[in-house]
Amino acid sequence: MATVAARPRLRVGIVKMASCDGCQLTLLDLEDELLALADRFEIVEFPEASSLRSAGPYDVLLVEGSVSTPDQAEEILELRRQAKLLVTIGACASYGGIQALRNWSDHDAYREAVYAHPEYIESLATATPIAEHVKVDLELHGCPISPEQLREVLVSVAVGRRPQIREEAVCLECKRKGAVCVMVAQGVPCLGPVTQSGCNALCPTFGRGCYGCFGPREQANATSLARTFALGGREGVEVSRLFAGFTGWSAPFRSVIAEYGGPPGMTPPAETRPEGGSDARR
Amino acid sequence: MHGDDGGTLTIDAPGVEREFKVPYITRVEGEGSLSLTVRDGVVVDARLKIFEAPRYFERLVVGRTGDEVLDIVARICGICPIAYQMSAVHAFEDLYGIRIDPSVRALRRLLYCGEWIQSHALHVYLLHAPDFLGYPSALAMAADHREIVEQGLAIKRVGNQLISALGGRPVHPVSVRVGGFSRAPRRADLEDVRHALDKAVEQAQATVRLVATWAPPELSHPQPLVAMRHPAEYPYNEGRIVSSDGLDLAPGEWGTGFEELHLEGTNALHARTLDGQVYLLGPTARIALTAQALHPLAFEALAETGLRDEIRVNIHRSIVARAVELLHALAEARDIIDGYRPPAEPRVAFTPRPGIAAWSTEAPRGLLHHRYEVDERGHVVHAQIVPPTSQNQGAIEADLAAFAPSVLDLPHAEATHQLEMLIRAYDPCISCATHFLDLRIVDAARGEGTG
Amino acid sequence: MSVSSLSLPPADPVSALSASWFGAGLSPEAVARLAGIAEVRDVEPGTELVSEGQITEAFSIVLAGRVALRTLVPERGMVTILTVEAGDILGWSAIVPPHRGTSTGIAIEPVQLLELPGERLRVLLRSDHALAASVYPRVLQAVSRRLSATRLQLLDLFAREEWSRREGQPW
Amino acid sequence: MVADERMPYAPYPSPSGTAVAATPVPVTSANGSGPWFLARANLDVLLDLLHEDDRKIIGPTVADGAIVYAEIRSVEDLPTGIGDEQSPGHYDLVDHGDRRVFDYTVGPLSPKRWTFPPVVPLNVGRRDGKAVSFEPSVLEAPRLAFLGVRACELAALGIQDRVFLGGPYTDEDYRNRRRSALVIAVNCTTASSTCFCTSMGTGPEARGGYDLVLTELDEGFVVRAGTPEGADLVAHLPVRGADAGQMFRAAEAIGKVAATMGDPVPTAGLHDRLLAQFDSPRWAKIAERCLSCANCTMVCPTCFCSSVTQRSDLDGDVSTSERVWDFCFTAGFAKVAGGSFRSRPRDRYRQWLTHKFATWVDQFGTFGCVGCGRCITWCPVGIDIRAELLQIAPPLAARPEPARPRPIASTPGSFATARIVSVRPETADVMTLTVGDVDPAFLSGEFGQFAMVAVPAFPPLPISISRFGRDTIDLTIRAAGPATASIIGLGPRDEIGLRGPLGSSWPIERAMGHDVVIVTGGIGLAPLRPLIDGLLAQRERFDAIRLYYGARTPNDQLYREELRGWAARGDIDVQLTVDRAHDDWTGPVGVVTHLFDRATWDGSRSLAFVCGPERMMEATVDALEARGLAPDRIFVTLERHMECGIGLCGHCQTGRLFVCRDGPVFSLAQLGDIFGREGI
């Protein structure tokens, strides 16, 4: 402890796969502490913000985005070799992200739907979380991640303790804030009970149901919640669409989506649903 | 300019090729590549190649309702999610014939101001400024110019504050719904940011003066311009699509004036006018086409720089245009908050109807067009999303072609840096088009140079 | 460090057997028949009494001293997995096919044993089912005790909780 | 027990600090406490009085589709003509179109939010070089007046009074908040389908615990005072004596409500019936529906569990601690190094339900449930505890005696700094710190007790005291994670924060004149070392003393010189074994029970003290019982997630016991069938 201040500056890298850049932007959104962090850490790789580059090694590597191309599937292996700590930031890297919805469908149909010349397009049939490819030391949830949790991870690394990231349901934050449950009082479907906290109950306190962007919490009983939605008069895809969002590819949500007929607008079920990325190239 | 007489330089050895390489263009959102061929000092081909993982958003929204679309399309870009929500929400409200409360309309503009502020502050201070002051990054720049970086972060923070007050969080806010907002802020919710705005406006005025003093590389290359124009206000959500060549379309009619092409070796769909012209979007185009609608403070600041004409022809000056718009967004945000009265109902009820939902709004980087085919249940059947960056690619290529000759006999590193800088001047949001730039110059006229 | 002392036991097989945990409760006839083929043997520290993989010649009851059961682990050498003290049995493989030792038993103290030659004991048990019926449960009891003890060892209860591995968080 | 369960919820102390009339005020009596009548038009006078008294009024108002407690500025804020309809998983507002303002039942919020806030700052820890300091946060208790508090909520306040003020340790913040709040109650004249206060004996009529109580009629309110403060308020109100008709209609309204509820949860023997159902298959059934989202616990007006969180600066030199609501339904809640003791939702639900209706009675003498029905209405999937309780209600079973704690003053935020005198490595990853300048309480601590040890930026850790010196104590710590590592990393003259001594101790007195068997493994020897010191210090008062110690390898044995020294004495039998060893080890190899498998001593004359990993203790207890040791003569220590160390945060609950407060030393008899059971 007394030696913390004497520690060398840790080498930090921030890289992206298929994503919107919003999670790395969250680092820049730590405006008040950004420069202090820059003094504390040596940011050696952060192409979005710096022309200085480094192929590693990294003490901490923050990875945004999901693995969606053959190149990325290989790149992530090397990045893992270079990283002492590999932390995925956000729903894409941790759960595949919204683009993982294509994992339910026929990939070629997708390509043709968007591009005049699908043959030009280099991409995997699936968009998959980093953990399906390499060992991940910590997954930060959220679409985007919470600045507080990102800060907590960096502080923990600096101080040398375990990050205190709660595994609880969004409901705990919601009730601590004194918000009225939108599901019970207004009949609005809400994924809060099965979603990990970290957003400070954002949607419920903005009059909406949680759409699960922080992903399933531990022991998430999505089956029971889905059944409750169904009993509330929804059927089939009207239930699955609630789970088929930014973390729909997570195991608990995925099984509910399957149970209720797959995500909306899916082109006839991919005969064999791809589970992995690198093994599912087209 | 050097390029013009490049072919006559004595160090030339015909037939030998010279190659520049930049493995990765940094300080842009995303990744991509460019190849440039110069023969006898003349660029014969310049092509932006874009091949990052496609995310198939147009397909992902199929089967979804308008509200779901708002959440999904925001994820196209973490820097300008609100732009995507705005084009989409107006498209659906236009189709469903929804009349939104005036206060809600004001809130929508306020929210858009927030995005312009954080996006422009990010680019001006953290991405673009280091080019003029000669640093690899703003963080490195902070060592010598901490006050500048801190000022940029402070302004950016105000933008995020605004977005959070209205939408809960700076990235992917959650309150925009078809018909209004899921929750409208109380006046008290806007107090903190209102106080912050006074200082930020002054800082933005200083910013305009500051960036105007930064000397850019020489370039004089006028291009066709396209932007929204509104009789009464600087264009965000409403107005008509106009061009420097006299085009004048309703926000939903983009398709009648422009088309998308899918070029080989790229994951991006490039846009052209129907007669095949490339065109330029964004701050430069807006300043040129509708400066008179700027907030008086911003208009004044622009006038003081005396650079209005140069901005029109030298993309490197876009940092000035962006700073002026930054000032505009802050000043307008302040006015909107001062006049804000919470709406009776934050959201009006509606019933979906089938048809075409199409609209365009002005993202920080320029015109953003959405078009959705909707069925009777209000579910999307087909979607087309045209982000500003893919519309700008043609213009970027044309500018590179015009600019490259002037840097060919600069030291290699400097030349590459200036070409990279030109691309950065466009603030390409590659995560919108999801693309990767890898700069490559093939100079057929030059020897295998060491640069 | 242990203060368990080596008290010299009675030297004659019958009383030695009935005094032991194994012999206690056996019928006099059983004791007599077993003692009939048994002999008391004293060995020096270092003596190899049972050999892993080799035919086990004798079934013994330890009367005094300590025998280490060891097994060879490549790169770690001989590792002691259990010690057998006074009262316990040694070489049960002598009466359980294929009669090969499951580990190597080495005296690490002066040891006194009551030894029953495997071949003769097997003949005896085959011929006298009543005797077998009272001997095998004791053998099983001893073996199962070792099994459950080994399971606990397997749990490695005192090992440092490697939280980093457990939680996948190396810091 | 039954009498105990039905004990009236007399608050402790009364909300305004003075004693409450022991006998509740029956509606028909007429004495100094009323009844009076307050015209509806004059309700605002009451609010003005409270405001003049410089109080913030917390009362019912409509927000986000429900009637919630919030600040009330005027009668306009009250839910005039608004009522509610509640059912499992559903809450709706209904417009009655009349003038009544209290014609609803209970909303999602309860006074708990103000008496036990969701987030409370505890302290600021600072490190300056080697010195550390912990500055307790000073908390202002706002002057509040609760308006519209229902009988069940009064009962809930009474229960929290017992939890936070009635035990050996008290929560000062709670005390101040209670003291500074005035309580204006309202008798229920309506009930929801989810209400069952009649079963829990808490309502619908307020029975003490209020300063003032109103019963609403169309034309106004029948008013009674419960305290001098209440009577003083009435003295300034435009009231007249209530007439017989008004008193009758008030009593009638309350009676009708009681009748509508019936008795859905028969409580007679419920405590014992539930405790007998640890292994009911029903728990798994409930878990299929239960989301373990903790909504039930958060809306519950009595649930009092919490966790402490730290937020530190980039270098960990300054860190602030906060106490936040946390509950038995979250995974982290029962976590220790090694995982969660209640990993399965079924375990969490069982923990909650058995606590509410059984073990709570053992701990606090009342049920933890007041029948407000919030957990039913606000359960997203509509689980109805009334139905579940009926499902799980077989015949009575025997109930072991609860433990009694020893009082020591201590609050979760207060750490005294102590200075490290010396550090001694025991093994590769175990250190013994000798700590001086400790709170005198430590020097008179008892064998087996522990201390909460804190350094800034890390969660405080429970560490058992491994020696009581003349003016120092020893702490033997194994690097099991970053927090322990950070403590082990400290050196002489470094400071640490200490709180305690805490917990129960080895009952050395009971061992006098008996044989003593000490069975321990690994670092489990540490908490036993003071006991051994004590035994040897007065050796003649005990018969045979046997120490059986198992370690992973010879190098993992603690206190090796001392072990040698003890063995050399000859008056204590020291037997050591290891799980694995190389040829150079000539001692026994095998599990610790192996050491006395065939020993000849007689268990019936012995007392046993056991400490080690839970599985090791289970095997040991089996062996000891096989030797004839009775459960009340076998003492073990339990490891659980301890956060506050004094039984206020709820983390270490094991059945009816708080391990930190009632333990960590327990007799097997005390633990009963809790010992070695999964998921408790």
Image: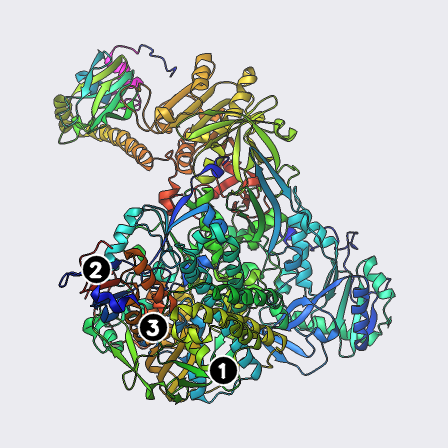
Nearer mark to the viewer, of 2 and 1: 2
Quadrant for residue A16, please give it: bottom left
Image point 41% across, 85% down: which residue? B241
Nearer mark to the viewer, of 3 and 2: 2
Q: Amino acid at mark 2?
A: Glu
Q: What residue did someone put label 3 on? A: A260
- The image position of residue A272, as x and y in percent, is 21, 67
User: How packed is label 2: few (under 14 Cα within 10 Å), some, or many (20 or more)?
Assistant: some
Q: Are marks 2 and 1 in contact (CB under 8 Å)?
A: no
Q: What residue did someone put label 2 on? A: B19
In the figure, is residue D550 to the left or right of A168?
left
- The image position of residue D211, as x and y in percent, is 78, 60
Decide if residue A209 is in sight here: no
Subunit ID for the residue under disc 3? A
Image point 33% across, 29% down: which residue? D579
Q: Are marks 3 and 2 in contact (CB under 8 Å)?
A: no
Decide if residue D139 is in sight here: yes
Q: Report helix, strand or loop for mark 1.
A: loop
Quadrant for residue B135, please give it: bottom left
- The image position of residue D290, as x and y in percent, is 45, 62
Q: Are marks 3 and 1 on the same chain?
A: no
User: How packed is label 1: few (under 14 Cα within 10 Å), some, or many (20 or more)?
Assistant: many
Q: What residue did someone put label 1 on? A: B179
**Observer-nearest of D438 and D584:** D438
Q: Report helix, strand or loop for mark 3.
A: loop
Subunit ID for the residue under disc 2? B
Q: Characterize the magenta stretch by its predominant secondary structure.
A: loop
Distance (Cα) linking label 2 and label 1 = 55 Å
User: How packed is label 3: few (under 14 Cα within 10 Å), some, or many (20 or more)?
Assistant: some
Distance (Cα) linking label 3 and label 1 = 29 Å
Q: Give the extent of the magenta segment.
A: C9-28
